[in-house]
Amino acid sequence: MNIQTTFGMIGFSGGELLFLTLSLALTAFWIGMLVECARRILNGDTRQVGWLIVIALTHGFGALAYFFLGRRSATVAQP
């Protein structure tokens, strides 16, 4: 029995399985970026409050923007 047959019996097609996997990965990434931003706020970096709001309200887009833009600025600014 191959993987296509196994997931076909469960009711997932290849496209549905790919979508589900990518959705779960993006959600895990979003939660990770929320946690990292919140930790920086708790450590005294109050500039990250805006980023926390953006990440929380825009899900994947905000998490990706923070990953590429917000983390870098926070890392450079810390002594």
Image (spheres, helix red, strand yellow):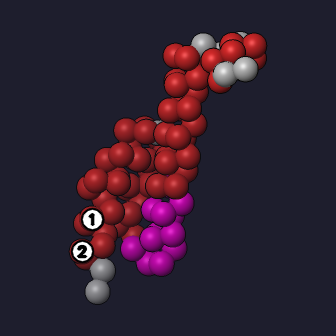
Q: Residue furthest front?
A: 1
Q: Is residue 7 visible?
A: no
Task: Name the residue at 46% across, 69% down.
Answer: 41
Identify residue type, mark 1: Arg
Task: Name the residue at 65% across, 24% down.
Answer: 3
Residue sitting nearer the eye, 52 or 7: 7
Q: Secondary structure at mark 1?
A: helix
34 vs 10: above or below? below
**Residue 22, which numbered label?**
none
11 vs 48: above or below? above
- Res 8 quadrant in image: top right
Is residue 44 within the magenta segment? yes
Q: Is residue 71 left or right of residue 10?
A: left
Give the residue number, with chain letter if any, for mark 1. Answer: 72
Task: Name the residue at 52% across, 55% down.
Answer: 32
Identify residue type, mark 2: Val
Asked if labels 2 and 1 touch by Cβ distance under 8 angstroms, the answer is yes
Estimate the x, y position of residue 56 in percent, counting from the top left.
49, 45
Give the residue number, with chain letter if any, for mark 2. Answer: 76
- Res 35 quadrant in image: bottom right
User: Main SS type for the magenta part?
Assistant: helix
Estimate the x, y position of residue 36 in percent, counting from the top left.
48, 63
Check the picture and name the quadrant holding the C terminus: bottom left
Estimate the x, y position of residue 14 in percent, counting from the top left.
55, 17
Is residue 52 within the magenta segment? no
Q: Secondary structure at mark 2?
A: helix
6 vs 23: above or below? above
